[in-house]
């Protein structure tokens, strides 16, 4: 069968290769699930792996099959599989357990191991292939009604983890009912953060660079939120007009924005950082003021990355609610389809050059 792979450590090594088709018997304990891949979303992570910024091959291989945002359909199950059956739509969890105490209790997304395991990213093959096999515990059922947007499960899970952790942290408050949120950035993650927060009844104001008319901004307003270009309305002005923000979800990829946001977080507020910033940017910030405000205002700032099964299940639940509450909205995010694994060069070109892309995804198999 075909797969899209790279040679980790070698820039621009992406290629199509033939690999053996897996079998449920590859999982010796009887809980294996064979999944035929339908769609795979791709993002900057795949681009950066091909640029040799990070990523490792599985032990014994010289290549890594990439792709970590999957939707597939179950084709065969092992004798000890209980909750899945052939014909189910499913998404696969990306991070896998290592050796730390957190890995052993199912919180492998919080591992303290120096080496970690992620399908399609590090030491485990990903999903840009025709079939994969995995244990039932790492596969999450996607409701049939979400079949057309189920490829968004993994990115939604990242948002779910951030929002869930914010509420978990604020259990210290005994009572915490956030009313207003700012979302910094309106790429895929920023739009999905706007969605998840709106589904919780929170007022959302999203910020981006582009001025209206702008599709991403219109999508925020379709949710009942507000969109502002920072070129026209900086964050501080909206704080003065609308009151302080209880939650700020930062998803711009720009560390300077993260610290600007920290200046405008409300008392008892939570700043969620989701950007991966690998550069060497140096930013001058009013550090004394930020420190003082965080201390006196009982504020919290934390980073979030990856997700575990709990967050994937939250994601499928919110996808179902979104399909009902905002019909057609999620489909608007799937802007740039790529037809077939053999079109991997076009896939990479879209990731690099499609300025208006929200989500690039590969149609591996058409039902």
Image: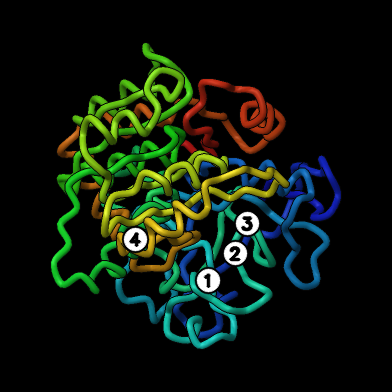
- Mark 4 highlights which residue? 299
Dot 2, crowdedness within 10 Å: few (<14), some or many (≥20)?
A: many
Residue 118, numbered circle: 2
The image shows residue 34 at horizontal and vertical percentages of: 49, 63
Q: Which tag, 1 or 4, sits closer to the chain's start?
A: 1
Q: With 25 as the anchor, is 169 left or right in this view?
A: left
Q: Position of residue 33 (x, y in %)?
A: 46, 68
- x and y percentages locating residue 225 in the rendered image: 23, 31
Give how far apart the Cα atoms at labels 1 and 4 are. Answer: 49 Å
Q: Mark 3 — residue?
A: 120
- Per the model, the C-alpha gap separating discs 2 and 4 is 32 Å
Identity of the residue drawn at 36% across and 33% down: 236
Taking the spot 47% from the left edge, 30% from the top edge, the residue there is: 358
Categorize mark 4 by other alpha carbons within 10 Å: few (<14), some (14-19), many (20+): some
Helix, strand or loop under label 4: loop
Q: Which mark is residue 204?
A: none
Chain-order first, disc 1 or disc 2 = 1
Q: Nearer the viewer, residue 354 or 33?
A: 354
* Mark 3 vs mark 2, CA separation in Å: 6 Å
In this rendering, the label closer to the viewer, 1 or 4: 4
Question: Which comes sooner in the sequence, label 4 or label 3?
Answer: 3
Q: Nearer the viewer, mark 3 or mark 1?
A: 3
- Residue at label 1? 24
| Side (left or right) of 107 relative to 352 | left
Compared with 146, 81 (above or below) is: below
Examine the rendering and report whether any part of residue 204 can be seen. Answer: yes
Q: Are marks 3 and 2 in contact (CB under 8 Å)?
A: yes
**Residue at the image position 61 percent from the left and 64 percent from the top:** 22
Give the secondary structure at mark 3.
loop
């Amino acid at each position: 069968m075909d797969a899209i792979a790279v040679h980790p450590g070698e820039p621009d090594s992406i290629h199509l290769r033939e690999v053996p088709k897996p079998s449920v018997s590859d999982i010796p304990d009887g809980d294996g699930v064979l999944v035929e891949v339908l769609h795979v979303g791709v993002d900057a992570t795949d681009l950066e792996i091909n640029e040799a910024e990070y990523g490792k091959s599985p032990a014994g291989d010289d290549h890594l099959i990439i792709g970590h945002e999957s939707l597939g359909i179950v084709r065969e199950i092992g004798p000890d599989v209980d909750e899945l059956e052939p014909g189910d739509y499913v998404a696969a969890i990306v991070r896998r357990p290592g050796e730390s105490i957190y890995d052993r209790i199912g919180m492998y997304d919080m591992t303290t191991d120096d080496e970690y395991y992620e399908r399609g990213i590090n030491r485990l093959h990903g999903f840009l292939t025709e079939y994969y096999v995995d244990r039932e515990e790492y596969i999450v059922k996607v409701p049939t009604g979400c079949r057309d947007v189920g490829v968004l499960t993994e990115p939604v899970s990242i948002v779910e983890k951030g929002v869930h952790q914010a509420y978990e942290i604020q259990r210290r408050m005994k009572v915490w009912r956030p009313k207003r949120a700012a979302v910094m950035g309106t790429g895929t993650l920023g739009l999905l953060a706007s969605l998840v927060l709106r589904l919780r009844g929170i007022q959302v104001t999203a910020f981006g660079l582009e001025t209206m008319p702008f599709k991403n901004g219109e999508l925020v307003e379709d949710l009942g939120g507000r969109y502002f270009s920072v070129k026209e309305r900086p964050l501080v002005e909206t704080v003065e007009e609308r009151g302080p923000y209880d939650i700020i979800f930062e998803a711009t990829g720009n560390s300077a924005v993260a610290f600007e946001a920290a200046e405008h977080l409300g008392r008892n507020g939570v700043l969620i950082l989701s950007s991966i910033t690998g550069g060497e940017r140096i930013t001058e910030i009013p550090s004394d003021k930020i420190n003082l405000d965080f201390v006196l205002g009982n504020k919290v700032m934390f980073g979030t990355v990856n997700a575990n099964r709990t967050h994937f299940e939250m994601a499928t639940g919110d996808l179902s609610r979104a399909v009902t509450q905002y019909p057609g909205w999620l489909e608007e995010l799937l802007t740039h389809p790529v037809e077939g694994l053999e079109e991997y060069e076009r896939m990479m070109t879209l990731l690099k050059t499609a300025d208006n892309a929200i989500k690039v995804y590969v149609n591996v198999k058409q039902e």
